[in-house]
Amino acid sequence: MVKYSRQRECILRNLQSRKDHPTADMVYESVRCEEPNISLGTVYRNLSLLSETGQILKISTGNGPDHFDGFTHPHTHFICKRCGNVLDLEGFSATNPIDQASVHFDGRIDDYELKFFGSCAECLSIKK
Amino acid sequence: MVKYSRQRECILRNLQSRKDHPTADMVYESVRCEEPNISLGTVYRNLSLLSETGQILKISTGNGPDHFDGFTHPHTHFICKRCGNVLDLEGFSATNPIDQASVHFDGRIDDYELKFFGSCAECLSIKK
DNA sequence: ATTATTGCAAAAGTTTTGCATGCCG
DNA sequence: CGGCATGCAAAACTTTTGCAATAAT
């Protein structure tokens, strides 16, 4: 049974109010204004809980810590291999990818994740 | 300048000859028959190098260690959230996803990764 | 009152790195 | 030879966990 906690509330609101894709540590630093005594362990515990219940998304970039997203509507991410930044990516849509992929698969598919990798505009401008 | 190494050769051949998606540690255990003195550090160093040069793929599952794939032709993976296994997934194809995604993006997209999550057939059979 | 959640700190797990030595070109 | 790669072990980094105290129902 999940009980209310001020800390979890704060973490969720923080994540929903921002448009970037922070790491656990960035969330920790950010919520310390409102919750000065919160611990990093609590942030990790709640980020896990929230992503298990589908209230947030966990994004593993393949390099460094995981990132989190308060916007859970299916969408695509871009990960910059130079600076590690995670951005939303518009303009790609697959129609019913889960149905499509399930046809020839005998397990059960619940979710999918589409990520693109490359160099973000900012990194390109620094050094071609 | 990259120099030949017996160890790297062995790691690459190992990865290309198997159809599963082993972790660094699994590769380490596996190549020790041929290379009894190889160290885990060397395995990590070479897996990094090989994936940077595009000779293998690195697959981060979002839980536990990364997995690696010796088959680099673009294809889709399924990750079981119960046992953590990584499987190849047939039956999904997107046409030119990179071109499609690049239209509305001002960075440069080099690569993409499509992953599905759920429960594999084996795990489903154990407990619904 | 009962049980989930917290803060803290220690531990676990994965990956990277410094260094002396060995091997490739 | 000169420099990249190795083996080893220590360190770094991210995430999880045990525990006593606190807060929610």
Image: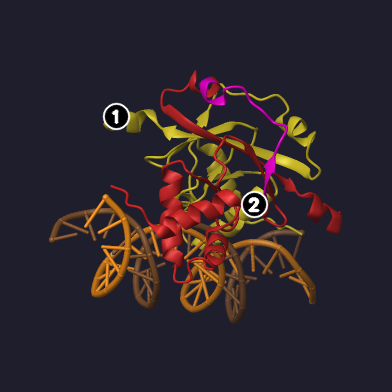
Chain colours: A yellow, B red, C orange, D brown
Q: Write down the residue under mark 2.
A: B20
Alpha carbon distance from label 1 to label 2? 37 Å
Residue at screen point 50% across, 45% down: B56
Q: Write down the residue under mark 1.
A: A128
Residue D8 rendering spot, x and y as whole percentages? 39, 76
Residue B65 on the magenta span: no
Q: Answer yes or no: is residue A9 visible.
A: yes
* Quadrant assignment, res B108: top left
Q: Amino acid at mark 2?
A: Asp
Q: Pick the residue in front: B40 or B118.
A: B40
Number of disc labels: 2
Q: What residue range appears in magenta? A: B86-99
Residue B126 rendering spot, x and y as whole percentages? 84, 59
Residue B93 rendering spot, x and y as whole percentages? 66, 28
Residue A103 rendering spot, x and y as whole percentages? 80, 33
- The dot on residue B75 is none
Residue at screen point 46% across, 41% down: B54
